[in-house]
Amino acid sequence: MIKAASIMKANEDRDGIYGLHAVAAALAAGELAELWVVPERHDEVRVKALVDRARAMALPVVETRSGDLARKVGSDKHQGVGGLLCPLPTLDLPTLLAGLEGKAPALFLILDGVLDPHNLGACLRSAEGAGVTAVLLPKDNACPVNATVRKVAAGSASRLPVIPVTNLARTLGLLQEHGFWVVGMAGEGDKSLYELDLRGPMVMIMGGEEKGLRRLTRAHCDFLAHIPMEGRGGSLNVSVATGICLFEAYRQRHGVGCGVGTTGRFPGEGE
């Protein structure tokens, strides 16, 4: 067992994760570089299972006091376990696009101005479940993929390509040049989500929590669409709306349910 003091100091600026479920998910996803454990919790069945698994994966298992672990992960609700997250894999958009040639039509998710890490983590989890090819995030005006995001995403942040982009407008132009339709989701969109055929190469853009899609982003969309709703609750939480939109795309792409869309054509086809 490795003593924690020097290692935790050296790793001071790197992302840590905590809690039994979150650490177990990170281990399963191959996201952990080190496991941090409070010694007196070793005998607990779930903690011991994490320690045994980390050792089987040849990961360092670091003993630390409860208070030190709380300071490291920013919470005293760590349940006696935490871990140092590995850096996320990096991939640039041109390389990803080149690798898509000859494959099934890709689906990209762009989150334009999502600032809450819990929302971002939930969106990444839905994106992986719905078979999204990659998630694109603006480098500015966006939440970074930090430890909180990765905890909520439960491994999806590592398994799903997440690509930061410097200029969103230029990125949308590049994707359109590669044959992608760009659909922005907005409450005032003139088309219903369920009127669109989402089977082709598709970019779906979701706006931020407060302002929705930015003006320049809207200008680069081929279509604006909305989720039909009743009641007076206003707009949906962005992570809920993202799940609805992505799984409608999944339904259409995989032939689930009653047909594909209501128009039987790609957005704009025949207009």
Image (tube, helix red, strand yellow):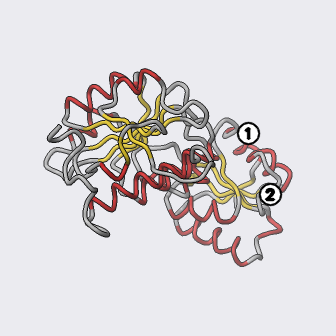
User: Which residue is found at the position 28% from the left and 25% from the top?
Assistant: 173
Cα separation, mark 2 vs mark 1, equals 21 Å
**Percent x, y for residue 67?**
86, 51
Q: Which residue is mark 1?
A: 9
Of residue 252 and residue 128, the one placed in the foreground of this image is 252
Query: Furthest residue to the right?
Result: 67
Q: In the displayed structure, does residue 75 sit left or right of residue 24?
A: right
Q: Which residue is mark 2?
A: 77
Which SS class for mark 1? Answer: helix
Which SS class for mark 2? Answer: loop
Q: Residues within 10 Å of mark 2 (few under 14, many from 20)?
A: few
Q: In the displayed structure, does residue 256 sit left or right of residue 25?
A: left
Q: Residues within 10 Å of mark 1 (few under 14, many from 20)?
A: few
Q: In the displayed structure, does residue 239 sit left or right of residue 245?
A: right
**Percent x, y for residue 249?**
34, 54
User: Which residue is found at the position 62% from the left and 43% from the top?
Assistant: 117
Image quadrant in which the C terminus is located? top left
Q: Are marks 2 and 1 in contact (CB under 8 Å)?
A: no
Image quadrant in which the N terminus is located? bottom right
Of residue 125 and residue 239, the one placed in the foreground of this image is 239
